[in-house]
Image: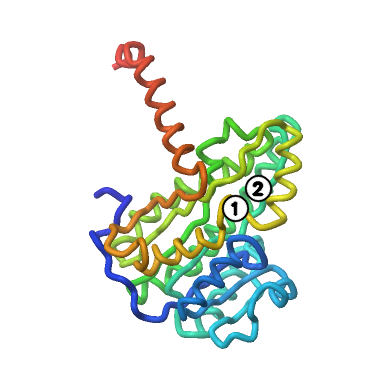
Amino acid sequence: MDPSYTNISAFEPIRAQLVWLVTGTSSGLGKRIVLSALARGDKVIATARNLNKLRSTLPVHCQNLKTIELDVDSGYTNIKHTINEAVKIWGGIDVLVNNAGIGVKAVFEEGGSEMFRRQFQTNVFGVIDVTTAVLPHMRKRGTGTIVQVGSRSSWTAECVPTWGQYSSSKAALRAFSETLATEVEPFGIRVLIAEPAENPISSYEDVRTAAMRDLSGSGFCTGDATKAMDVLVDVVRGEGKARGKEWPLYFVFGPGGEKAVRHKCEKILRVMDEWKDVTDALL
């Protein structure tokens, strides 16, 4: 079975009110996803390490919004307890959005394995812990959607020096999410790998400066980030431009996103074609 689609060839728009749980909502794409879901009349559980930040960025008095403290680095036991409490708020979680993440910046030799461990702890193991804690609740109900917020940089790692730790963490996210999609599809659970595009970067110092700004600010999606998150909610709900389309496993968006993926695929195919006479001789 092709895991890039579920068994729903053209899924119907979701008319019911959904319950979303979104991690990393104090700024950037996470905040915008919360606002977009609320605008559709859905209910949202917004999480952050520090709830004080949410009071100035989200409509915390909205009856359809609840906020809870969640540190994705706190370990599976703590995360499971928090998720179980979150489920009690409205009786379930329909959509999990794993948006929380960090960006560790270091030249490969300078950072070594320590920097990779720091990066993977949040962007990979934190996502795994949150997803593992939510899955039993979705599986019990026989329905659910998991949105993994990846990055175009996982397709362009060779173009963004000093972001090797971040790019590789997002590549790992995509890889295990592909397997996850296949494993949970029989239980009526869908997976969407959303990969926004980042700003183009030209040099080491530009990378360091831009990374410090982007990673602490409004997120990685260039162009109209609000519109991008509205489209993401359309995909989950099967509304708007997503109406009548097959469910995608991959959702690459933002300026340059499609170009980056096509370029990487074409690059790999060119190498395979050029070396075909050598590799075929190994058979």
Which residue has dot 1 on it?
Answer: 123
Type of residue at label 1?
A: Asn
Q: Is residue 248 above or below residue 188?
A: above
Q: Is residue 70 left or right of residue 271?
A: right
Q: Is residue 4 left or right of residue 221?
A: left
Which residue has dot 2 on it?
Answer: 119
Q: Residue at x 61, y 67 (%)?
A: 31
Q: Is residue 220 above or below residue 241?
A: above
The quadrant the C terminus occupies is: top left
- Residue 140 locus on image (x, y percent): 36, 75
Label 2 environment density (alpha carbons within 10 Å; few <14, some 14–19, many ≥20):
many
Q: Are marks 2 and 1 in contact (CB under 8 Å)?
A: yes
Q: Secondary structure at mark 1?
A: helix
Label 1 environment density (alpha carbons within 10 Å; few <14, some 14–19, many ≥20):
many
Q: Residue at x 54, y 36 (%)?
A: 156
Color theme of the render = rainbow
Q: Is residue 233 left or right of residue 277?
A: right
Q: Residue at x 52, y 55 (%)?
A: 149
